[in-house]
Image (cartoon, helix red, strand yellow):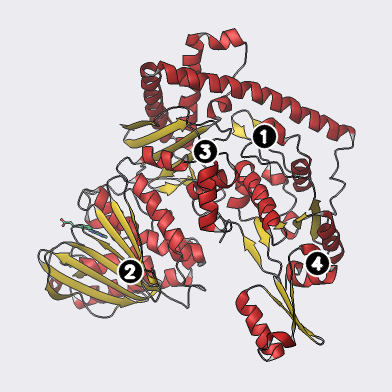
């Protein structure tokens, strides 16, 4: 590290101007750097800071990271690593700490020895967090001394200063997001907890803690969780499958490196019919899969097929098995580290690097071959399961073809119950999936038919969590939903065959009663979307309508209320706070509203609120659906008691 005086004043100023321009660009177009400025982007700030500490931990310098949400929704991240260097940075003429905190993409440049693999989806570095924070403070403990520097919207308030002595090492970053950038500043405990849990599975041996000073428990201590996994991906797979019956006693596991790509995989089989493969690149969930997932599938199919061929069972049973027969009841987590990842796809969560395919397939093949050789009994159980899947798939195809043939015979048109809209531009159009014929009738009368379509659902929606695939194509309600949406599901070759480009509406709105049955139907529909049309959710096309809970009336004046607070406020406004002077109607079913009321409160884009369904954590969503809809009753009861409603899948 050199001395600042070596730089002349002009160079110093020029540098500073560049820095300010960089941070200004972040503030002008925050979404370009952190994805969006909504709840997701807000949380992204935490991931960005935690990622730096994870890097320090992965480099072997730290095994504990503490995240704290403070009363004012500021967040601090403390690690016990080497501490960010504070010496003068020769080129920039200021402290290295200041450079890291204020120069875009400066983060990793000091430490060429550290293998940087974490780093958020956008990998923009901590300086972006600084630029988007109204208050930001860095504290470094290094070589017995403690240093600090504070900033506001990215600008240092003073040069790095020494503030005392210390007997440990590490870095503390505390930031408070800028309210002029982010419309909402509220951090969600569960969102942070889920990500830290995922991080602990993906990076075994690192202890991650979360403390929420906004929420004090009955015993007087703040809400707190610790996430630590010794077993890493094996425990991740067990966590995902905790409600499912296992076919093999312990998940398989393999860690390796091929062509410079570190690969880690764990997999197991359960008695369910769904496939659940989570994939990560540099700790980022690749929802849309990519080359690593292709490599995984290739090896799985090839290795299991060749084993099954050798045993002679396939020839004996005369069944033609296909790729996805090997994935029924499969739960797996794939984690790879890629130096320069190329992200593609609709949501930029699909890995494009072609070299990764063979790295993953090589590792998976080795893992499977070892397992099959050493565990003949379990190997046989898996092969039997594959055979069963193949037979069920053939039955499913027949059922599907039958339905399609019938559709052709009957003209193949839209379902009779659908009241379609006039507009045919999917971007402008929305469809309401409405519980019950009577509410469906009101919705049909109340809607704006230029862009709103209504599909009443009457019969039972199939629980896809427990049903074999072929039964899905025989279920009338599911058939109606699919034909109305214009999409086809099922599989073609090795890929899911969702033809999303044919989707006829870009808003799919689930509208059910505010009672137990309504929430059950909503969960059934969501489970179906999650398992068969996840892309619809990923693209943000799925919504939940929010009918009001109350109507408070006095004379000719009335107010709709969605919350208890609103109800009390309305009673205050209309009845001077006296409950007996007003009439309060509690809406239990959509049917209790007439068409005008339904339009005004729940369907009119001017007044309504729609809850967008998002999947923050695929693992959590899977767990939720398997618990709510699956077989293992005891955890489900416990879960429902704890979580009252189904929450959490949505924001
Ligand atoms: C580069 C070099 C060194 C430490 C770090 C980066 C570092 C960065 C962060 C970000 C969050 N926590 C961190 N901890 C450390 C130190 C190099 C050395 O001491 O030789």
Which numbered mark, 4 or 3, is in the foreground of this view? 4
Quarter of the render that holds ligand 1: bottom left
The residue to which callout 1 is attached is 490
User: Does dot 2 land on a helix, a strand or a loop?
Assistant: loop
Q: Position of residue 197 (x, y in %)?
A: 39, 51
The residue to which callout 2 is attached is 221
Q: Residues within 10 Å of mark 2 (few under 14, many from 20)?
A: few
The residue to which callout 3 is attached is 276
User: Does dot 1 land on a helix, a strand or a loop?
Assistant: loop
Q: Position of residue 428 (x, y in %)?
A: 74, 60
Placement of the C terminus among the 4 image quadrants: bottom right
Is 209 on the left-hand or right-hand side of 437? left
Placement of the N terminus among the 4 image quadrants: bottom left
Which numbered mark, 4 or 1, is in the foreground of this view? 4
Q: What is the distance, in whole Å, between disc 3 and disc 1 at their CAs?
A: 16 Å
User: Does dot 3 land on a helix, a strand or a loop?
Assistant: strand
Which numbered mark, 3 or 1, is in the foreground of this view? 3
Q: Residues within 10 Å of mark 1 (few under 14, many from 20)?
A: some
Q: Which of marks 4 and 1 is nearer the N terminus?
A: 1
| Residue at the outermost front position | 580
Q: Earlier in the sequence, mark 4 or mark 3?
A: 3
Is 479 on the left-hand or right-hand side of 283? right
């Amino acid at each position: 590290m050199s001395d600042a005086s070596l730089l002349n004043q002009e160079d110093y100023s020029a540098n500073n101007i560049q820095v300010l321009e960089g941070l200004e660009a972040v503030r002008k177009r925050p979404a370009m750097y952190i994805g969006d400025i909504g709840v997701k982007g807000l949380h992204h700030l935490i991931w960005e800071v935690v990622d730096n500490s994870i890097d320090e931990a992965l480099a072997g310098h730290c095994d504990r990271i503490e995240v704290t949400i403070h009363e004012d929704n500021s967040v601090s991240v403390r690690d016990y690593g080497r501490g960010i260097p504070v010496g003068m940075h020769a080129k920039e003429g200021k402290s290295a700490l200041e450079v890291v905190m204020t120069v875009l993409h400066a983060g990793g440049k000091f430490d060429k020895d550290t293998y940087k693999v974490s780093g958020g989806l956008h990998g923009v570095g901590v300086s972006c967090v600084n630029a988007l924070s109204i208050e930001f403070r860095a504290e470094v403990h290094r070589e017995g001394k403690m240093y600090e520097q504070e900033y506001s919207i990215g600008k240092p308030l003073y040069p790095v200063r020494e503030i005392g002595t210390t007997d440990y090492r590490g870095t503390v970053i505390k930031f408070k997001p800028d309210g002029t950038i982010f419309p909402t500043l509220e951090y969600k405990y569960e969102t942070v907890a889920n990500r830290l849990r995922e991080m602990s599975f993906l990076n075994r041996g690192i202890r991650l803690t979360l403390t929420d000073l906004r929420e004090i428990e009955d015993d007087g201590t703040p809400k707190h969780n610790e996430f630590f996994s010794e077993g890493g991906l094996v425990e991740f797979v067990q966590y995902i499958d905790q409600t499912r019956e296992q076919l093999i006693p312990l998940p398989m596991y393999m860690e390796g490196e091929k062509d410079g790509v570190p690969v880690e995989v764990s997999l197991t089989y359960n008695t369910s019919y769904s496939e659940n493969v989570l994939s990560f690149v540099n700790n980022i969930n690749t929802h849309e899969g990519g080359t690593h997932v292709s490599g995984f599938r290739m090896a799985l199919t090839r290795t299991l097929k060749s084993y099954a061929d050798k045993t002679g069972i396939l020839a004996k049973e005369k069944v033609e098995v296909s790729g996805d027969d090997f994935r029924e009841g499969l739960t797996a987590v794939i984690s790879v580290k890629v130096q320069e990842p190329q992200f593609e796809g609709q949501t930029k969560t699909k890995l494009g690097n072609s070299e990764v395919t063979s790295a993953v397939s090589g590792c998976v093949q080795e893992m499977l071959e070892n397992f099959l050789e050493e565990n003949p009994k379990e190997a046989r159980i898996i092969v039997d399961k594959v055979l069963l899947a193949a037979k069920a798939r053939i039955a499913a195809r027949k059922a599907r073809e039958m339905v399609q043939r019938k559709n052709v015979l009957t003209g193949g048109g839209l379902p009779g119950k659908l009241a379609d809209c006039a507009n045919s531009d999917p971007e402008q159009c929305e469809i309401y999936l409405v519980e019950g014929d009577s509410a469906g009738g009101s919705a049909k009368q109340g809607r704006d038919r230029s862009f709103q379509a209504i599909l009443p659902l009457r019969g039972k929606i199939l629980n896809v969590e427990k049903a074999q695939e072929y039964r899905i194509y025989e279920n009338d309600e599911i058939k109606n939903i699919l034909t109305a949406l214009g999409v086809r599901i099922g599989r073609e070759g090795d890929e899911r065959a969702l033809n999303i480009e044919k989707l006829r509406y870009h808003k799919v709105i689930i509208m059910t009663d505010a009672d137990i049955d309504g929430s059950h139907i909503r969960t059934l529909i969501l489970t179906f979307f999650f398992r068969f049309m996840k892309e619809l959710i990923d693209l943000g096309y799925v919504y939940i309508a929010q009918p009001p809970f109350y109507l408070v009336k006095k004379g000719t004046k009335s107010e709709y209320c969605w919350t208890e607070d609103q109800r009390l406020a309305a009673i205050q406004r209309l009845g001077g706070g006296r409950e007996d002077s007003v009439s309060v109607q509690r809406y239990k079913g959509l049917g209790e509203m007439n068409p005008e009321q339904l339009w005004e409160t729940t369907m009119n884009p001017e007044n309504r609120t729609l809850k967008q369904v998002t999947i923050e954590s695929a693992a959590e969503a899977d767990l939720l659906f398997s618990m709510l809809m699956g077989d293992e009753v005891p955890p489900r009861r416990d879960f429902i008691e704890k979580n009252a409603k189904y929450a959490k899948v949505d924001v």
